Amino acid sequence: MSDLQYVTKDTLEHMRAELQRMKAVDRPAASRAIAEAREKGDLKENAEYDAAKEAQGLLEAKIASMEGSMANIRVIDESSIDTSKVSILTKVKLTNLGTKKQVVYQVVSEKEADLKAGKISITSPIGKGILGKIVGETAEVQAPAGVLKFRIEEITA
């Protein structure tokens, strides 16, 4: 991954804690599982050993991936968010002009996106469509169901 990812300080701390857990807890556990399986005899026909080695490989790949992602992270200071236009970490009240329903989303990085919590990714169709818009503007979003139109009602931090 060479793209910069913008995250909050909380998300970075969560990622660091997860990486630390994988290195300090999961990695030694994987090594113990391999050692236990090795003690059970012939490695050529030892499915438990093969499974333990595969699990260790997946864990190491996940650790490497997370370390790579963390190298490209930039932390956003939540106190310096510009609310004059839609940008990352702003909360946006939208009106769907087709259904007249209002929704509030916070625009976040891909790592933080959680639709149930009202957090949409900056790279999602809606996120891309509303990015840079100001209050009163209409955003046209290309969705699988067709073009959706949203009016920006309010932008807050």
Image (tube, grey):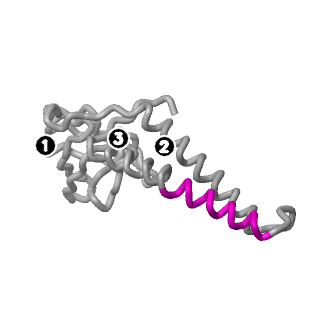
Q: Specify few, some or many for label 2: CA neighbours under 10 Å numbering under 14, 14-19, or 20 or more.
A: some
Residue 144 in the image, given as x and y percentages of width and height? 46, 52
Q: Which of the 4 quarters of the picture holds residue 141?
A: top left
- The one nearer the camera, 133 or 9, is 9
N-terminal of the two: label 1 or label 3? 3
Instruction: Identify the residue position indicated by label 3 in the image.
Output: 122
Q: Amino acid at mark 3?
A: Ile
Residue 53 in the image, given as x and y percentages of width and height? 70, 57
Q: Is residue 145 left or right of residue 45?
A: left
Q: Residue at x 31, y 62 (%)?
A: 116
Q: Amino acid at mark 1?
A: Thr
C-alpha distance separating marks 1 and 2: 31 Å
Q: Nearer the viewer, mark 2 or mark 3?
A: 2
Q: Residue at x 52, y 57 (%)?
A: 26
Q: Which label number is shown at residue 60?
A: none
C-alpha distance separating marks 2 and 3: 20 Å
Q: Which label number is shown at residue 66?
A: 2
Q: Which label number is shown at residue 156?
A: 1
N-terminal of the two: label 2 or label 3? 2
Q: Is residue 68 left or right of residue 60?
A: left
The secondary element bearing badge 3 is classed as loop
Q: Which of the 4 quarters of the picture holds residue 86?
A: top left
Question: Is residue 30 in the magenta section?
Answer: yes
Q: Nearer the viewer, mark 1 or mark 2?
A: 2
Segment tinted magenta in the rendering: 25-40
Q: Residue at x 58, y 52 (%)?
A: 59
